Image (cartoon, rainbow, N blue to C red):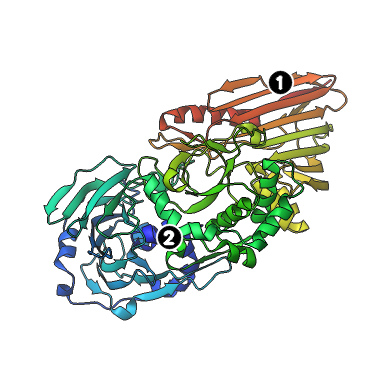
Amino acid sequence: MKQSELYLLRPRTWSHLVSRHPATLLVLALVAPLLATPAVASKPETVPDWVRTAAAQTLPTYSAETNAVVLLDETTYTVAPDGQATEHYRRVIKILRPQGRDQAVVAVPYDKATKILSLHVWSIGPDGHQFTLKDNEIADYGYPGQGNFFEDNKIKVANAPGSDPGGIVAYEYEQRIRPMLTEKTWFFQDEIPHLNQSFTLELPPGYTAGTVWAHHPLVPVADLENQRSRWDLKDTPGINLDRVMMHPSERALAGRMTVHYAGPGLPSPTQGTWQSIGLWYQQLSQDRLASTPEIAAKAQELAAAQPDFYSKSEAIAEFVQKQIRYFVIEMGIGGYQPHFASDIFHNRYGDCKDKATLLSAMLSSVGIHSALMMVDHRRGVIDPDAPSIVGDHMIAAIEIPSGYNSPRLRSVVTAKTGRRYLIFDPTWEQTPFGQLEHGLQGSYGILMEGEQSQVIQLPVLPPDLNTIRRTASFQLQPDGSLQGSVTEKRFGDVSERRRTIFTTGDAKQQAEFLDHALEDDFTSFKITSLKVENAAALNQDLTTTYHLDADHFGKSIGSLLMVRPRVLGSEYLLPGREARSIPVDLKQTMQATDDYTIQLPAGYTVDELPDPIKLDLGFAAYESTTQIKDNLLHYSRTYTVRAVTLPADKFPDLQKLAGVIAADEQNHAVLKKQ
């Protein structure tokens, strides 16, 4: 996580928590001994009636791949007159398959401001034995600093026994909620199905509330009187993405409801609008954005020799991107509030919101305005129709001067005010200034501009800003061996992994990486004369050149020699074969071109060539040709992806594209010895 989401999470089982807060993986090793610790059997009457009632339900028919089912999921959220909130939560789960055993590990996160008032865990084994965990069987684990972050968040973790298929796991807790802002998000859908769910809101006199729904139709509210409201759901399906290729994030598909409430004396009510969220965040961040003489001096030093807006912004942005180390320190509200720009500059480290804050302070020192923008690194999570602070990352929106234009301005949005902003993420170390990493393209961000705050869609960049260009000349020998020189140029996100390897890896790691990249195309090969240029220059092509010797490339069959015109480099797609109902995530727009020439061995002529291919499906296009001239076999192709997501009804077209690419990559030319 680049920004803490613990406030937003409803604690559930271990697998549920890990899926939504990846930092939890860092304490998994510590929890392992706990998972093997058996609990003490209790008397049958110690398991509450509501657990036994839930366990006695008749289940619908679920698919054979369903690991577990939530029988009961109840949340009661109570707001006191002073704005303090308390959450009471109950959950009962039935394990259906051995793979569902991780649902028996209960994990409830908390910190100094979100005290757990009580936590009880019970289970019923498949044989009917009932268990209650004692207090000393519920352990506390924290995040004691792991090299790239420090948080004061902790987790109470318990392993319920009897978690074999047929077993029941239940728990109940009451927790004081951090009153950072007046909203509460109910995440009611995850990877396993839910049979019965409810969310109850209890407000004091004089309070009002409204809801917004994301990825789910609005559910009618039941008025329980006395400022109490309840929403009920039944038979919520699980989102099983285990065998779904090229899928969006689970959080981008899962239904949720956000309650916004307001009352007498409450500070910063969010009121269910993006503007109110921006105003709330302005109060947290505005004093943190201030420049200092030291910050101003550095910014002016970087910008002094630069001729225009773009060059000045680029010089400062690259300083923050490369010289301010990514390091998370989050305590309490620090999950949302940035540190002071002066501290970030002095310490030379910070998390995403810190880096965006320092960038804003430095730009302001040279007369360039910028704003913070809250996003989520998983495309589709932020819903433009459901205002909330459900996001996990912060980037920068740099205002472009009126009338200024440049072809280098690529990731640009226009706000309702008519102002244009260049969107840039100073945390993403391998994305050139002026562009935006592929995971954010096409998603939404909250432009934090006080009264003018709004949700805004981020651009999808054209394919020619994310390119792979391979060219090569080879000589084919009569025994099928191949020798030649290869040049590969990459620009944009498709160069990210290689830039990292060639700037931070040693010679052995670099050689192993290149060997791995080619091992699917050749059975036996050797690379020599490797040269890499512009690995650290993000706004220039990463250029790799080398000499290749490959044995047994051509396959002899009597007087015939079979060769693959597409010598190297694969664009093979794996969309899967089953019909689907969820969108397709194509990951990124891009364009790959290959241009290969093979000099045929003396005494051979072409007997058969692959047919040309030309397919344009709108969201993507693919074409290739294989020709012969003057004893030279020439292969060229262009593969273009123009979209980042596809609706489910376009999945057959994607399968067609995948089939065409796979067939072309395996096509052979047939040479005949005269």
Percent position (x, y) of residue 76? 22, 60
Q: Classify 185 as above or below 468.
A: below
Nearest to viewer (mark 2 / mark 1): 2
Q: Classify 24 as above or below 594.
A: below
The residue beneath circle 2 is 18
Quadrant of the rendered image containing residue 17: bottom left
The residue beneath circle 1 is 609
State the separation of the CA atoms marked 2 and 1. 52 Å
Looking at the image, residue 53 sits to the left or right of residue 39; the answer is: left
N-terminal-most mark, 2 or 1: 2
Q: Is 369 or 124 nearer to us in this picture?
A: 369
- Determine the residue positioned at 38% across, 61% down: 7
- Determine the residue positioned at 82% across, 32% down: 473
Q: Is 172 or 297 nearer to us in this picture?
A: 297
Work out whether residue 628 can be spotted.
Answer: yes
Percent position (x, y) of residue 118? 26, 73
| Residue type for callout 2 | Val
Quadrant of image for the C terminus: top right
